[in-house]
Image (cartoon, rainbow, N blue to C red):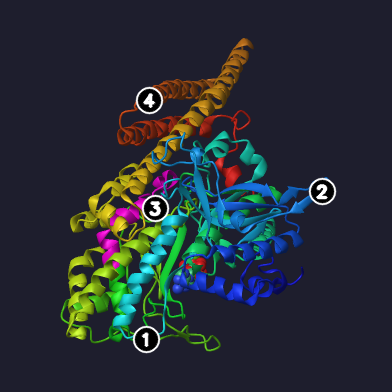
Amino acid sequence: MANLGDYFGTNVFNDAVMRERLPKATYKALRKTIDESLPLDTALAEVVASAMKDWAVEKGATHFTHWFQPLTGVTAEKHEAFIAPTEDGKVLIEFSGKDLIKGEPDASSFPSGGIRATFEARGYTAWDCTSPAFIKDGSLCIPTAFCSYTGEALDTKTPLLRSIEALSKQALRILKIFGNTTSSRVITTVGPEQEYFLIDKEKYYKRKDLIYTGRTLFGAKPPKGQELDDHYFGSLKENVSVFMKELDKELWKLGVSAKTKHNEVAPAQHELAPIFTTTNIATDHNQLTMEIMRKVALRQGLFCLLHEKPFAGVNGSGKHNNWSMATNDGLNLLEPGKTPHENAQFLVFLFAVVKAVDEYAELLRFAAAVPGNDHRLGANEAPPAIISIFLGDQLTDILEQIENGGAKSSIQGGELKIGVTTLPTLPKDSTDRNRTSPFAFTGNKFEFRMVGSSASTATANYVLNTIVAEVLDEIAAKLENAEDLGGKIQEILKEIAVNNKKIIFNGNGYSDEWVGEAEKRGLPNIPSTVEAAKALLVEKNLRVMEKHGVLSRVEMQSHYEIALENYIKTINIEALTMLEMAKRQILPAVIKYAGKLAESINSINATGLDIDTSAQAELLTEVSKLASSLKVNIKGLESAVEAAADMHENIYDQGYFYRYSIFEKMGILRADADKLETIVDREYWPIPTYGELLFNV
Ligand code: ADP
Ligand code: MG
């Protein structure tokens, strides 16, 4: 396995393997099912299962598993050996079509948000033939959707697949209006850039907060943070480079096209981006990427942190969800061309996204809401919690021209001369970049930057697909009966330019002025996951999800409950971990150090010499004051956690209490401990410090 070309995709039952191993007719039928999203013929499954089994066993696989994505945000698998015993004490290797297409994992221990009582445990997994099976750790993994006995989705893949269908249907109507007769499907494409931190494994295991919650709950700011900007794109340290090489290789074997890798802004922070692919496969691949990152890190003596905000005071991690729409014959529908003002089809698709994002901003905000992301959104270094769109100079200018009667020109980029004769003249992009926008047009795609680093990309994309499908549907309905097509297009674009322009913001999204400006424009600013979840109960949002068959009202209600439940559990674990660390590690260490100071004062005084002990005395006073404040705040947090346990009536109120009472108290407790860290002798401090975690890889 020396050469990249030889091992890329070796563990994937991909198109090449299918073509080679399936009878021609079966291959053709399966291909057609995948490409045209047709119902799966069960007879076909039998033949595919047999070929899949032979292939997997030849590669040393002993088990198979349905691989699914319950609403926990991570993947689930239950492995079954291929064996069936025979009378003579041997085994047959078995794997039937039924094994391939349907699984019955006990659904009772996965979140369902009240859809299903625990005693109605039945759940089904169903083969998703649009995402290829693969071998991981000796098991054939079959990507599947997961639903309840009554057919409700219990996962993120099902709504994603439904939304892909919905968008395709509406986008094709628009294409037809523009005279396209060749495309038969529209797919959404996604390339998620994944940020992560790598820290030393030994130090990781010394911090209960990292182990239980994935983030540091304590930690004073080190003398050096990210202020020098010397980490971004910096040369890779050797062990990080070894990690990245091995990661690439493992991902390539799984057919994940890991493409770019580099150091990120914060110390110990890095990024990986794959080449974009269909939304469904990109989502599966991103899950695999996160899993393999963790595994490979451990092998290298490192620990990979995927939490959105593992360290206070330095940048958090996100997942930049690059998204576009393309026809099955390869046309990117968000490609503006050289003169976008003349490209009516492009403008319709572009404006549809603008309108969708403006009108369903709350739903999109929910799609980025996980507890860890609350530390990022609205904080200094990340996109604010306000959704806005960056279009850039050229397209904003066109939008304004349309608003004022019609677009006549496109600003051109021209050439970029660097001023050194030996350097080439570069074609200049028509628009600069904007790193502070949560939803930025970047040439021929949108980049949704709010998604959390640990989150599945499924939610962001099924929301995006559905709301865009809705606007395309509205537009198609108007254009299909139009007598004067050109005039009607102008009218629709103008209407969007006028009504939805408020979502466009090309300035600095991290500035304080923007928060005020956004409020004036009436854009929602939703501070936390708790408030964000409410979007799932809003009639307009229920209607759009239901209308396009993506989530039923029952499913929306269940997602609402799961989001809040998950928030409450997460903060509860954090609070308990904090209490344990404060009570059993930090306070005892501080008391020991105070004793040491008192001892020093006593033993100096015992000498009878006239020696000044004010340094020790001052320190002792300071340490003791902070220690007693710490103790008081431990009590405060403890009673809040107890009070929360009694709030069963209303899950929203409980969530709100966790956010605005418990979470706030955690911050207060932390402040005492972080101050203590800066004055207590390092020898006594019980846990690795930020400096040691961030700069010792
Ligand atoms: P940057 O950091 O400059 O934003 P990267 O190269 O790190 O860019 O990531 C850009 C991502 O966008 C890649 O995953 C790339 O494959 C993806 N991408 C490019 N074109 C499209 C498209 N048409 N649809 C979806 N994703 C795309
Ligand atoms: Mg990037």
**Ligand 1 contact, mark 1 (Cβ < 8 Å):** no
175, above or below 632, in the image = below
Q: Nearer the viewer, residue 482 or 453?
A: 482
Residue assigned mark 3: 368
Judge: label 2 CB < 8 Å from ligand 1.
no
Residue 414, horizontal then vertical, whole percent = 39, 86
In front: 660, or 125? 125
Q: Which mark is residue 338?
A: 1
Alpha-carbon neighbours of circle 1 within 10 Å: few (<14), some, or many (≥20)? few
Q: Which residues are magenta?
A: 354-379
Residue lying farthest right?
A: 88
CA gap between label 2 and label 1 equals 68 Å
**Could you say which disc has been placed on residue 90 in the image?**
2
Q: Is residue 85 left or right of residue 538?
A: right
What's under tag 3, amino acid-wise? Ala
Tell me, yes or no, whether the two marked residues, 4 and 1, touch with CB atoms within 8 Å: no
Name the disc covering residue 640, or none: 4
Whether residue 394 is in magenta: the answer is no
Q: CA distance from mark 2 to mark 4?
A: 61 Å
Q: Nearer the viewer, mark 3 or mark 2?
A: 2
- How much space separates mark 3 and mark 1, taking CA atoms? 33 Å
State the quadrant of the N terminus. bottom right
Q: Earlier in the sequence, mark 2 or mark 4?
A: 2
